[in-house]
Image (spheres, rainbow, N blue to C red):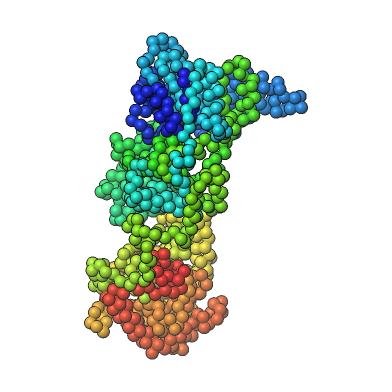
Amino acid sequence: MKVYLGCPQHALVNGALGDLGDSCLLVAPKTPVYFRSDAVDWNTFLTKYCLLPASLGTLSERLVFAMARACERVLKRESYFGKVRHMPRFHQQLVHQFVRWGMDALTPDLLEEGGRLTATRFDDTETDLREEWLHKTEELAALWRAWRVELHRLQLVDPAEQWWQAAAALRELSSPAPLKVLLIGFTDFTAVELEILKALDARMQLALALLYDSANPERFAPSQRLLARLQQQICVETVTLASDESASSAPQTIVFSTPNPLTEVESVAREILSLHREGVPFSSIRVLVRQPAGLIEYLDTFFTRYGIPYTAEVSLPLLRSRTVQSVLEGLRLLAGMRTGAEFLAWLAQPRFGLDANAMRLLHALRPQNAPSDRWLVNAHTRHAHTATVGEILQKLVALRETLRTDFYSGLEGLTLLFHEAGVPAPDFEKLLELAQAHAETLQAMPLPQAVEWLERLCTGADYTRAYGSREGVLVLPMEHADLMRGEVVFVLQVLEGVVPRRHPDDPFLREEERLALREALLPLEPRLYLPTRSEYQTGEPMLFYRACAAASQRLYLTYPRTQNDSEALPSFYLQQIPHAETRLYRVEQFTPEAPLHPYDRLLQSGLEYAEPTPILRSQQHRQRVANVDREFSVSELETLARCPFQHLCRYILKVRPPRRGLQLTDIGTAVHRTLYRALREERTPADPQAWAERMQAILQELLNDDPFDLTHWQLQVLEAYATRLLTLFAQREPRYQQQFQLRPAKLEWAFGTATAESDDEYERVASGASDSPQPARYRLRNGLEIRICGVIDRIDWSQDGVAMVIDYKLGATPSKPDLVEARTLQGLLYADVVRRARNVQHLVLAYDHLTAGRRVRFVPYEQTLIQRFRAGEWEGSPRDCVIPMTEREWQGAFQKLRTELEFLIGRLQQVGITPTPGTHCKTCAYADLCRQAQK
């Protein structure tokens, strides 16, 4: 076997081919993109030219499943690896280690024997350490044997044994093959691969090209180590080629120092555009990244923005796939591990095609805090025959039942909701492979536990994703970069900890343990090869050299000065680059010098910002806002007076932000409903204590019959607060009725066609009005007539023609100036509607302040009425409870009410939507959409 020594890679390969001839077949390690059409990777070579099995070197998820079974059978809680015996990541690492150890000629028997041999070297004072080492090696050997037993039971083959069988099959072939083969780019071989090379060397003309330079042997330590192993097992003829390291052949080197990884990638993208303008084709440019998974999203974003064609194949964690995350969330929802509100958010994804009307139907379902599987059944029961919605719900209900009987089939059906059958989807393929491999375990678990276990399996799984097109700039890992040499090469993230990278120690056999095992076992098994962390670490200088040697004309080395919100250090390898030009970038100086792309023209000159005029330009939208030929609810008019923009969002655009958690309106709704039912049962309560207990029972019935979308502790808070308010009301209501000589006549009295869509107050109770008169009509001075609807909480009557309009309040009550100046519309509108609809001699407007436990009343200025509605001693200050108003003040308030209505309707006809900021912005649901909100 000939071994060619030289550097760099292109000169070494050309020199070897010149000696062997052009008919030589090139074999390289597996790389994302092959650099020559006549080259094949190592596994393809063994399969195609050596007739070895195609499954050689494949690690399937069934191997991990077998390992999980072996761990379950062998390991106990008190075992050495007992704490991690149920972790899928532990099973995956064990499989990889056992396969690699097996390929390096280590067996369970050798591992156990090596543990005993090395244990004799410990002193008597190290008894605990010796016992721990023996316990560890014996347990690893037992696990290895149990895993092989499980593989035999599942009719699977140990990949390491398959490699050794392939080597034995090659040795048995006696006929030579007329083939010349040159291995390039290799830096290491396992023990079984050396056996295969030994067998191939006897059948064909085999040669190996190794990077090496006698002037700098430390840089090429992996090549020296591999050459020494080859000389021990194979008859080797070394040929040293002259190195091509002259200064004239060195590429121009430029170093980019950027503020952060984002600007690092953007500076690279802009430089690529500049080079392309100079005539460098995209296909001649390489971008090398040590950790592609960490930068691929930045690269994809900027290359797409600047229109740079590129291609990349990146291994990503399976849980980084958004579609896989959606599928796993769907499994949690179908298993009842989430709430109905989270099910709604999941169904809002565009892939389900549900429009706003369909989502509005689903949002109307209550309770949304119910378990997601129960919410699904409820939604399907109500909307099974609704177009689109019913079809999707039917599929989900069927999938839920399938998951319980056949987990894999249910998961496969769920993935089909996210992509079409037959379309390649590597992330879904990996997910289904995991589920199929562990189908026995998953099927035996309850559905929620199976979903959690599948998610744990996904945590340690990776999948390969292709980015870009199959042309343009090549984005490659740094390993084997010199096999795909380019005119221009960018090496990103040249940082300490990345280049060079500190290799982690093997958690199962650390460096000192590997050295001890090698020393003890080499006499028993000369082919044994257990590389250590330090040996891997010596390969870092050669890796950086190969990355730099991949450039023929220009080499760009870039690094960010900060990473992950902390300072980053450039690699000390940069100090070894002679005559490098350094470009220092700052964020504030990152201004395009020339418009390389349409995106640059937006950055070239800044535009002065001007606040847009708050007008609606769509004629259709203007007509919707200006339409006054309809019924206005009292709540809508209050909102219109408070802020036109808030009115636009709620009543015109009908934007309904999601309600989260316990709100004050929930307490108000519960109290309103309870008071409505209690007063209908008993309008003149005699015993306050008994009435309070009855209202508590009614409240409990309401919470059981129509639960709110709240958690358990929030319901407890609501119940406690509402009980306190109802107790206070029960104590004062009999006193008021006895003193005022009034009785409740109308409860939740509706005028007009008030609906939950038009009036917030209507949502609190089901309409229980005994009659629903016509809407209140107001003819304005411009001849326009508007219709107003609403719901009055309560109206009390007396035999002498006195009426009291009562409005329940949880918040603050209006003051007299607010009422006289018509700054509050609700109370005045209610009073005016009752005054005009009924034959009332005297009208009292009252606000029952539920929290303060008192009833604030605006009374006509007559001594008999003032005395009749006077404040009790238990109410506190009289001026806070009884507010007299003269007839002139009443008439002036009603007149200003009409004036305010004229102003509001006129502004609405002119499509005025300019916000009026104030204290209400702090609680406005649309503040995030408003440019003038005062938060």
Q: What residue sits 30% from the left and 51% below the top?
A: 354
Which of the two residues, 810 or 730, is positioned nearer the viewer here?
810
Is residue 641 depicted above or below 59 in this figure? below
> Does 933 sit left or right of 509 as displayed?
left
Which of the two residues, 165 or 89, is positioned nearer the viewer here?
165
Q: Is residue 833 among the parts visible in the rendering?
A: yes
Residue at the right extreme of this rendering: 125
Is residue 674 depicted above or below 332 in this figure? below
Find residue 544 and report its horizontal and vertical position in percent. Answer: 50, 39
Is residue 52 depicted above or below 273 in this figure? above
> Does 353 sit left or right of 571 as displayed?
left
* Residue 595 occupies quadrant: bottom left
Find residue 196 and report its horizontal and vertical position in percent. Answer: 46, 18
Is residue 799 depicted above or below 690 in this figure? below
Which of the two residues, 364 or 9, is positioned nearer the viewer here?
9
Find residue 546 and report its horizontal and vertical position in percent. Answer: 48, 36
Q: What residue sits 46% from the left and 20% below the top?
A: 2
Find residue 234 and report its horizontal and vertical position in percent. Answer: 51, 17
Q: How many marks?
A: 0
* Residue 913 occupies quadrant: bottom left
> Does 754 sit left or right of 92 as displayed?
left
Q: What residue sits 55% from the left and 23% below the top?
A: 228
Q: What residue sits 42% from the left and 74% below the top?
A: 917
Q: Is residue 675 among the parts visible in the rendering?
A: no
